[in-house]
Amino acid sequence: MERKEFLRTLGAGAAFAITFPCLGSCSKDSDVEGDIVAQPTDVDFTIDLESAEAAKLANNGGFILKNLVVVVKNLEGEFVAATQICSHEQYDQVRFVNQDGGIFYCDVHGSKFSQTGTPLNEIPNSTSKALKIYNTSLEGSILRVFE
């Protein structure tokens, strides 16, 4: 049976029943995963690098999410921390990707930021605001992330 013949046998009702659920998910907003949240304030926490929570920080390029902060061991082996909240539209989807030497990336609208927070691309209809970067310090196996 050819495709055209098969589609004719379905009829309009069956075709509508199959395609209708897809129509609601085709809008821009429903494709967005994540939440719009406020930027964290008074950031000051520690991570024990020997804990299970920090296992992904053992390797260069690894990152974890904690308290709305992306904590990274960059490709050079240095610890960097940035807000998980994108400066474009405040979605909590900023992650670290091993691209272009390691960048922060928000997959909601494709915002890219350097490890210093500088925007790397221009998002239409938005201001090019920097991504908030936090201080880090390491004492033994305890990593502190703070403002």
Image (tube, rainbow, N blue to C red):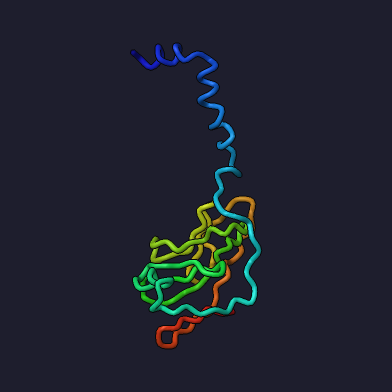
Where 55 sits versus 16, above or below?
below
Taking the image as shown, residue 126 lies to the left or right of residue 143, namely: right
Where 79 sits versus 33, above or below?
below
Residue 142 locus on image (x, y percent):
45, 83
The residue sitting at 52% across, 26% down in the picture is: 19
Taking the image as shown, residue 46 lies to the left or right of residue 98, namely: right
In the image, 97 versus 31, the foreground residue is 31
Where 101 sits versus 30, above or below?
below
> Which corner quadrant of the image does residue 56 belong to?
bottom left
| Quarter of the C terminus within the rendering | bottom right
Residue 103 locus on image (x, y percent):
45, 64
The residue sitting at 57% across, 79% down in the picture is: 44
What is the residue that sits farthest to the front in this orientation? Answer: 52
> Which corner quadrant of the image does residue 48 belong to?
bottom left
> Which corner quadrant of the image does residue 3 belong to?
top left
In the image, 78 versus 144, the foreground residue is 144
The residue sitting at 46% across, 81% down in the picture is: 143
Query: What is the count of numbered marks?
Result: 0
The residue sitting at 44% across, 16% down in the picture is: 7
| Quarter of the N terminus within the rendering | top left
Residue 78 locus on image (x, y percent):
40, 77
